[in-house]
Image (cartoon, rainbow, N blue to C red):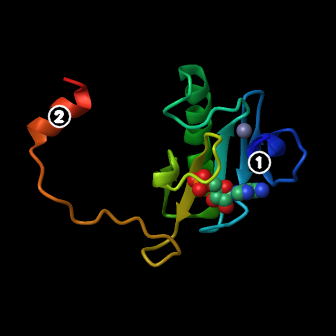
Amino acid sequence: MCIFCSIIENKIPSKRVYEDENVLAILDISQVTYGHTLVMPKKHVRNIIEADSETVSQVMEAVRVLSRQIVENTKAAGCNVLSNCGGIAGQSVDHLHFHIIPRYDENDSITIAFNESKEQDLDEVLKTVRGE
Ligand code: AMP
Ligand code: ZN
């Protein structure tokens, strides 16, 4: 059983931020910034690529409500919402989850950098991502 399924079934303790029939939000054990929260479906799906529409809708609605709640209550200036999808993207737990990471200032303990990239032919890229 995956570690988040064990948490959902109360076999492993967690700090529960929010829970309903379909969704659980817990404090990340490693608080990248103060208030760092994980929002996950109770149903085991690997990540957003493999998830069904209903499950994603339920989780995203909780992400929407909780991002606002967490930013307000922590008095953060904003937040990053992210879901790592696949090992190459840094997914270490194979159960869909969204990180809500409150942001306090530019020097808080997270950096998300978009490095300089090769120039691309955007029309060619567009065809590829559209599957044409
Ligand atoms: P990711 O690397 O995107 O798959 O994120 C997995 C997250 O789960 C990491 O930020 C971990 O700190 C967090 N995590 C792992 N085990 C636990 C746990 N038992 N309770 C709370 N968070 C956890
Ligand atoms: Zn699971």
Left or right: 26 with respect to 111? right
- x and y percent of residue 125 in the render? 17, 39
Q: Which residue is mark 1?
A: 3
Q: CA distance from mark 2 to mark 1?
A: 38 Å
Identity of the amino acid at label 1? Ile
Would you identify the image quadrant in which residue 102 lies? Answer: bottom right
Residue 126: numbered disc? 2
Identity of the amino acid at label 2? Leu
Q: Residues within 10 Å of mark 2 (few under 14, many from 20)?
A: few
Q: Is mark 1 within 8 Å of ligand 1?
A: yes
Say whether disc 2 or disc 1 marks the residue closer to the N-terminus. 1
Residue 77: numbered disc? none
- x and y percent of residue 49 in the render? 48, 33
- x and y percent of residue 51 in the render? 56, 28
Q: Locate the C terminus and report the quarter of the image it occupies.
A: top left
Q: Is residue 84 above or below residue 63?
A: below
